[in-house]
Image (cartoon, rainbow, N blue to C red):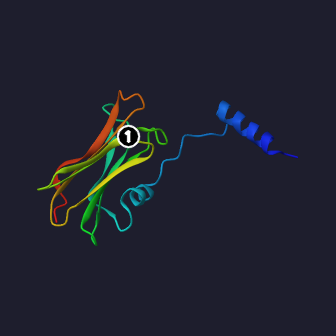
Amino acid sequence: MLTRATVTAAAAALLVTGAGVGAAQAHTASEAIQAGCGSGYSVVRDGTRNLVTTRGEIWGQVYLTYNSSTGYSCVVTRKTAFHGTSTKTLARLSVQGSTVREDWAYYSHWAAVKSYARGRCVAYWGDVRNPTGTDNAGGGRWTWGNCG
């Protein structure tokens, strides 16, 4: 008969040896957008960009979304590298004629920021740092677009 202690010991042994354990599975884009922005947001045209290191490695994506009911835009930076590990993660949104809004803190999964943008052009950017803070991957569009 297996006891809780036996099962716990076996699970711990698997974790120590790495047997049967893969990397943490990243959240889907829709899960990150729902959690970061709320309901009613859709990715806009030209609203998905990879977060790329100088070596060409992809560490995640940044999404520009819009809620037509509220007029708010939302940017979500979703980590696929270092997912589950707290690293510096940036979501930045600029609305033409307004101030830049950003969320630049330590997150394990994603960062998100939103701002009212109905009838205005927007620019967006995302960034993820490695755990030591010595390397990063970034992406987005830092020119005006998605006007209206």
Residue in front for this viewpoint, 59 or 56: 59
- Write the residue at 33% across / 34% down: 136
- Image coordinates for residue 139, horizontal then vertical, percent: 28, 43
**Image position of 136 with respect to 103: above or below:** above
Indicate left or right for 5 with 21 as reference: right
State the residue lying farthest toward the right. 1
- Image coordinates for residue 35, horizontal then vertical, percent: 42, 58
In the rendered view of the protein, which quadrant contains the C terminus?
bottom left
**Image position of 5 with respect to 143: above or below:** above
- Write the residue at 49% across / 42% down: 84
- Image coordinates for residue 85, horizontal then vertical, percent: 47, 38
Which quadrant would residue 5 be assigned to in this image?
A: top right
State the residue lying farthest toward the bottom. 69
**Image position of 87 with respect to 43: above or below:** above
Which quadrant would residue 120 be assigned to in this image?
A: bottom left
Residue in front for this viewpoint, 11 or 100: 100
- Write the residue at 71% across / 39% down: 11
Q: Which residue is mark 1?
A: 58
Report the amino acid beneath label 1.
Answer: Ile
- Write the residue at 27% across / 70% down: 68
Element carrying mark 1: strand
- Image coordinates for residue 19, horizontal then vertical, percent: 67, 36
Indicate left or right for 122 with 34 as reference: left
